[in-house]
Amino acid sequence: MKRPSPRTLPALVFALAALPAATAPALAAGGAAERYPPEHQATRDLIALVADAGALVTEKGSKEACLEFSREGSRWRQGERYVFLVDLEGNALCHPAKPTLEGRSVLDLHDPHGNPIVANFLRDVAGGRQEGWEHYLWPVPGQNTFYWKTSYVRRAGTPDGREVVVGSGDYQMKTERFFIVDKVDQAAELIEKQGEAAFPELRSKSGGFRFYDSYVFVMDAASGVHLVNAAFPENEGKNLLDLQDANGKVIGREMLAVLADHDSGWVDYMWPRPGDQPASQKSSYVRKVTLGGKTLVVGAGYYLD
């Protein structure tokens, strides 16, 4: 599967100015992942690794566990994959790839798009939630080259009764269907809470709704007008209900047909990647949202080739 090109940027792209965390509540892996279990072994391996790392923290505590996590060639640190720990105040307790971060607050850590990485981790495990997923740009260990990284985080208790966040991630991961469902559900909930005031966040690269080749779109079901199209802003304000893909499929009407008897569903069609041609095979998850008496279609997708 194709991925966006890596980005080589100076270290200062981590904007240290405090930016607010995304307001969309993160859904734990137990939500969408229960409906759409991981399809890829690498994803299942990552979940198992973080679960076992959490068990080690619970057994030995953060300091002893960190010694294990930092051991090169161990299960916990192989190649580009490593386990990290932060406390619930946003202080780095263990970061084998960047030990200079340990012992300091990393709440102001942002990726080049402005995503508040650690703040989002803490949001994922707040309010009774135990786990979550985040997608952000991060340098490969030992390099200054940024790639998309997907991390899985979860709460873990320590022997002295405290709780920490344990996580790990992989670069350029294959997209799981539940990644897409999570983002659409988050976008729908944000729209239900904020109305059209949510639209700028859905468009923004720092809002957490744009990752890899995926982005959120919002269409008025009655008129077919696109209200939000983060990757193709030139389509906003246009009626695309009868737009056909390269194979003649009428995309907007296909989405409405799927939602005629269901609150959500999947539609497959041909569509170009952002900034790329020609069209590629894409699968999008769409769901209905009611806003001010109107029915909106909120969706996002991923490319299959």
Image (spheres, rainbow, N blue to C red):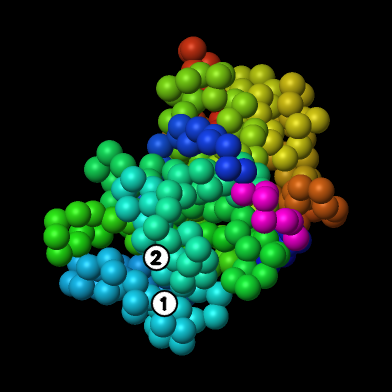
Residue at the spot 53% in from the left edge and 36% down from the top edge: 18
12 within the magenta span: yes
Label 2, secondary structure: give it. strand
Q: Tags 1 and 2 in contact by the CB under 8 Å rule?
A: yes
From this viewpoint, is residue 117 visible? yes
Q: Nearer the viewer, residue 125 or 189?
A: 125
Q: The N terminus is located in which quarter?
A: bottom right
In the picture, measured across the screen, residue 174 lies left or right of residue 112, that is: left
Residue at the spot 43% in from the left edge and 22% down from the top edge: 193
Q: Which residue is mark 1?
A: 70
Q: Decide: few, some or many residues near mark 1? Use Cα within 10 Å; few <14, some 14-19, many ≥20.
A: some
* Residue that lies at the very extreme toward the bottom in this rendered image: 73
Q: Nearer the viewer, residue 107 or 219?
A: 107
Q: Tell which circle, 1 or 2, labels the residue nearer the N-terminal end.
A: 1
In the picture, measured across the screen, residue 147 lies left or right of residue 83, that is: right
Q: Nearer the viewer, residue 267 or 44?
A: 44
Label 1, secondary structure: give it. loop
* Residue that lies at the very extreme toward the right in this rendered image: 277
Residue at the spot 54% in from the left edge and 25% down from the top edge: 198
In the picture, measured across the screen, residue 195 lies left or right of residue 12, that is: left
Does 64 sit above or below residue 214?
A: below
Q: Amino acid at mark 2?
A: Cys
Q: Decide: few, some or many residues near mark 2? Use Cα within 10 Å; few <14, some 14-19, many ≥20.
A: many
Dividing the picture into quadrants, the one containing residue 26 is: top left
Dividing the picture into quadrants, the one containing residue 160 is: bottom left
Dividing the picture into quadrants, the one containing residue 55 is: bottom left
Q: Which residue is mark 2?
A: 94
Give the magenta part as a residue range: 8-14
